[in-house]
Amino acid sequence: MPNKQTPKSQWGISYGELVWREFVKNRLSVIAGMFIIFLFIVAIFAPFIANDKPYVVEIEGQRYFPLFRHLGAIDYGVLLAGVVAVVQLILIRRNKKRVDPSERGEVLLKQIMISAGVIVVGLVLLYLFVPRRLDATNYHAMVESGRAENAVFAPIPYGYARTNLSVREQPPSRRHLLGTDDVGSDVLARLIHGSRISLSVGFVAVGISVVIGVVIGAVLGYFGGRVDFVGMRFIEIMMAIPQFFLIITVVAFFPRSLLNIMIIIGITSWTMDARFIRAEFFKLREQDFVQAAHAQGIGLRSILFRHMLPNGVAPVLVNATFGIAGAIFIEAALSFLGFGVAPPTPSWGQMLSLGVTTTGRFLWWLSVFPGLAIFFTVLAYNLVGEGLRDAIDPKLRKAA
Amino acid sequence: MKENTAKTTNGYLLSVDRLRTYFPVKRGLLRRTVGHIKAVDDISFAIEPGKTLGLVGESGCGKTTAARTIVRLVPATSGKISFEGVDVLAAKGQQLKGLRRDISIIFQDPYGSLNPRMTIGNIVGEAIKVHKGIRGSELIDRIDMLLEKVGLGGSYRNRYPHEFSGGQRQRIGVARALALDPKLVICDEPVSALDVSIQSQILNLLKDLQGEFGLTYLFIAHDLAVVEFFCDEVAVMYLGHIVEKACAEELYRNPLHPYTRTLMSAIPQVELKRRQQRIGLVGEVPSPSNVPAGCPFHPRCSLCDERCMQESPALNEVSKGDGHFVSCWKQDEFSD
């Protein structure tokens, strides 16, 4: 036993750190992980990267900030969530060094609760006080005509909903790096805004399916017997239904909103998670430490979710990363078929479907770029999932 | 910690009466019960407060099942267990919670019995938090105190189980068992997974703690040398039955059941004059799902005759009042 304690070893190495160390050994996964982080940054700052409103503009001697006034509650909300996430990460790192591990869980929970509270309150306030202003002013035209001056535009000076029929269906050029679509919107601007849809669909849908899957799987795996028998038949029925057709059917009945799509993907894809957790719980419930918790009279909920779940959650986490990729894929496919979010909200799948015009012409830039975006995002999630799986697998660790 | 003031039934802290624990064997699509594994079949014993009862027998003889039935981890089929006058098998709610506090268990495998995702402090302190509502620095003080009692420093509180050796882990298991000031500690082969050199450390620790807190032990083992050192009274189990029960000294001096004699002959002896002919056993232990008729030991017993194959002997006291019980038709052939 190391008795001389260096500051690092003072708290010992937790399982999370072990997995992390193993994970970072896999270069490809790390690169994929960085790509996903990059995508998140792009999604969070999308309105600041691609927007047809200038940050600052002077009109008749007066200074305006059209971009900031134009942003809606959702935009600010996402920004807020991003800030909170970064603060959380910093706090978790700090806690690792300062907080007694026996208290860590509670401290972390408290922080998450506070952050969630901040986000909720922030969103409500934003909804009340920051209505989205419809600003149809064409600042580019104003600048050109000389009415406005000293305008500072975003790096990509086009909004995702900007239509300009004079530049429709243009191939990539200096002005429009990835070309324009059938109504003259900039493809790059729409691609950047579209990342918000893809990423949020992935996370929320998988979040829903993991919660459902874990709860059902935990109950089946723990109680076993008749409960398990009935539950498993139900899961098999769910699995027998082709998921995509179910989703299309349901989407046809409900309004085309992003939230509906997320929920539908979430409640149709939990079966794998439930089966993983069930299998793990079957194994875990006979283990001595679970029996010890029983013998000490610790509550069932605590045994299920504090003792057993942390020991059985690894396969679900891995599955979740693949699930995110799958959800992004489903959303893209739905949008491609026209069941996705309604235009002008951009989505990668929907952009893809515009590649072939009604007149039958094939606009390659409209298919290739969104296609590549989907491809790389899904690939990145799969690589991260694979890296995570290898890092968690103890058999591989021993061999290494 | 307070001294144990035991309310007892007939002077016993724990008494187990005709306990049976069967596991149903289910087959087929409809999960019909086709038979039972008779893990524990009609055993009775009792422990006085502050004393240690040893339960010995080979693997699969039902020792661990008996222990788990007493702590209510496994449901009993029939019988009665009473602890301080409380009916253990019928306890519910607050009563059961009280039993969980008063009876604790130390597990055999120090690797499987500690949650790998929890710190030592959490493992030891969780029950204190749940049962006594103690939190914060007071909880930490108690955890440190417990860890020091079992010979680990409080500084280990924040570490994870995988950072410890087997012996250290077993000490943590002991600390956890003591967390709620129990009256009865069930030690389910606490040293059989450890190196011999570590075994004695843990045994001495358990002895010291017994003296300090006035604990009562139900000590399960398959190593007779360990039991001789540790126990006041010893019960020998074979195939779910208790075949012989006596105070430790008497049992080692004068084993009466052929099975006990076989076990005794297997203890390695250093002194030449104590060495005796080793009695070999033929055959395997029968499956507890298909216990032989008559004496459960008869297929392997060298003294077996007609009666042994047909009638099951009861556990009888050899001579009135000496506390030596044996369940054998041939007991007289060994008495000195």
Image: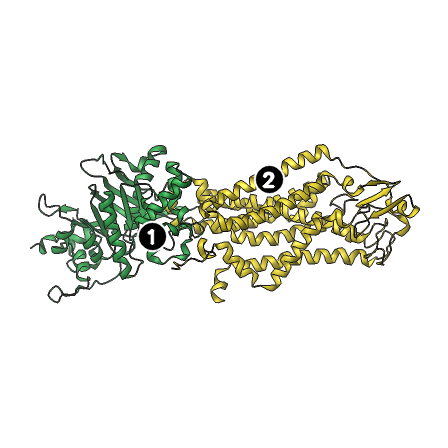
Chain colours: A yellow, B green
The amino acid sitting under disc 1 is: Leu
Would residue B159 be found to the left or right of residue A123 on screen? left
Q: Nearer the viewer, mark 1 or mark 2?
A: 1
Q: Is residue A288 above or below residue B278?
A: above
Occupied quadrant, residue B304: bottom left
Residue B265 percent location from the top left of the image: 17, 61
Depth check: give the residue in front, A48 or A168. A48
Whole-number angstrom distance, CA of label 1 to CA of label 2: 40 Å
Would residue A131 be found to the left or right of residue B183 on screen? right
The amino acid sitting under disc 2 is: Ala
Residue furthest right in the image: A145
Q: Residues within 10 Å of mark 2 (few under 14, many from 20)?
A: some
Q: Secondary structure at mark 1?
A: loop
Question: Which residue in the protein does label 2 denote?
Answer: A116
Question: Which residue in the protein does label 1 denote?
Answer: B152
Q: Is residue A309 visible?
A: yes
Residue A94 percent location from the top left of the image: 53, 49
